[in-house]
Amino acid sequence: MSTSLQLRKGAKRRRFVGFVLAVATCPAYTATLTGPGQTAHPGDSLSVSLSLANGAQPVSAVQFDLSWDPTFDVHVVPGAQAGISSKAMMATFLQPRVLRCLIVGMNASTVGDGELIRLLVTVNSNAPAGPAQMTLLNLNATGADGTPIFLQGGAIGVQIQTGTGVSLQPSGVLNGASLLSGPICPGEIVTLMGSIGSSSTVLFNGVPAPLLYAGAGQVNAIVPFGLDFSKPAKVEVRQNATSVTASVPMAPAAPAIFTLGSTGIGPGAILNQDYTINSTTRPASRGSVIMIYATGFGTLSPLPTDGQIAHILAATTTPVTATLGGVPAQVLYAGAAPNLINGAVQVNVVVPEGASPNPAAPITLSMGSYATQPGVTVSIN
C-alpha cells in the first residue's frame, strides 16, 4: 500500500452482524423506500437507486430485507443520503438472495429524502426474457428519539428483453471512488455500467480512454485529461461492430475519496506518515501528515499523459482545501499520485492540532464549490 493503491472495480459483498429495530407500537407516520423499474438484456449491469421519502416524520434509522430472483446478482452500497447523515450501512445474508440491510449511526441526525442505497445489479447472461424482480420486505424505521415510523416498500420490476447489444445506462456513469453518478471531469476514474463486454473500448468526444478493467456489464476507464469540460461529453462504448453513445455533463472537478471498503463511505484509502494504512488500530497523530487517495480533481499541471504511470509531481490547477473532524487542515500537496496511474490523485494533509481524537473523524477535500463525498472518515488519536 506504500507504493501502490488497488483500485477495485466495484463494491465487495460484506458480512456484518445483523441488528433488529424493534417496533413496539403501531406507528403514526409513513415513509417510503422505493426504486424505479428497469429494462435490461441478459448480461447487463444496472445501477438502481433506492430512494427514501420521509413523509411526516424525519427518519434516523432504517432496516429492511432485500430479496431477488435467481436472474440477478446484487451488491449494495450506501447512497448519498447515508453519507450526508454520517450513517453506516451494515448488511448480512439471511439466506441466499435475501440480504438484511441496516442504515444506522451513533448520532441523532436524520436521513434526508433521496438516494439511501444503491443496488449494483448484474443480469445473468442466460436470463430468460420476461419479468423479474427485486423485493423490499420487513421494512422498519425510527426517528431520532426512537419513535417507530411505518416504512413502505415493494417490488422493483425488471423487464428482461431478448437479444444482445451494447447499452449504457443513463445513470450508469459513476465516479470510481464514490460510486455516485453526476458530472464527470478530466482525469476522473469512472465506472461505466450497462450491456458492456470485456472487448469494449471507450471514447470521450472521440478520444480513446485508458481502461483499468473491462468485463461483463462494467468498464472502469479514465476520462482523458485534455477533455473540454465547458460542455457535455459524448461517451461512446464500442464493442465489435456495434456502439452506443450517451451525453454526460462535465465539470471542472468531481472530487471523491477512495474508501477501504470500496463502497464510497467509511474509512478512506489513507496512509499515515509512516506509510501504514490508517485505521482505528493505527490512527494518525495530530501534527502528522496523512496521504489521501482520490480521483476527479480535474486538470493537472503539467498535463499528464493519459494511461501512463505518474512519475512527476503534477499539481492540481485549482487549490485544494481540507477539513478533518470539521477543523481546517493544511494541504501540503495535491496532485498526481507517484507510481500510480494518472487519474489517481494524492493529497497530503497535516492532521490539525485542534482536531479531537476520533476513530471516525469526517474528512472533506474541496476545490472551490466542488467537494468530496460525505461519509468518508479518518482515524485520529
Image: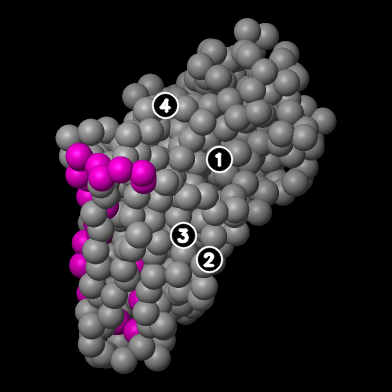
Q: Amino acid at mark 2?
A: Phe
Dots 4 and 3: beta carbons under 8 Å? no
Nearer to us: label 1 or label 3: 3
Q: Secondary structure at mark 4?
A: loop
Cβ atoms at labels 2 and 3 below 8 Å apart:
yes
In space, the residues marked 4 and 1 are separated at their CA atoms by 18 Å
- Choose the circle earlier in sequence order: 4 or 2: 2
Which-is-in-front pick, marks 1 and 2? 2
- The vertical placement of 312 against 44, above or below, is above
Q: Can you identify the residue that label 2 sits on?
A: 93
Residue type, label 1: Gly
| Distance between the alpha carbons at the discs numbered 1 and 2 | 20 Å
Q: Residue furthest top?
A: 354
Q: Residue at x 53, y 46 (%)?
A: 343
**Mark 1 or mark 3, which has the lower sequence index?**
3
Q: Which comes before the other along the chain, label 4 or label 1?
A: 4
Q: Which residue is mark 4?
A: 108
Q: CA distance from mark 4 to mark 2?
A: 27 Å
Q: Which mark is residue 187?
A: none
| Residue that numbered label 1 is attached to | 266
Instruction: Report the Cα–Cα distance between label 1 and label 3.
Output: 19 Å
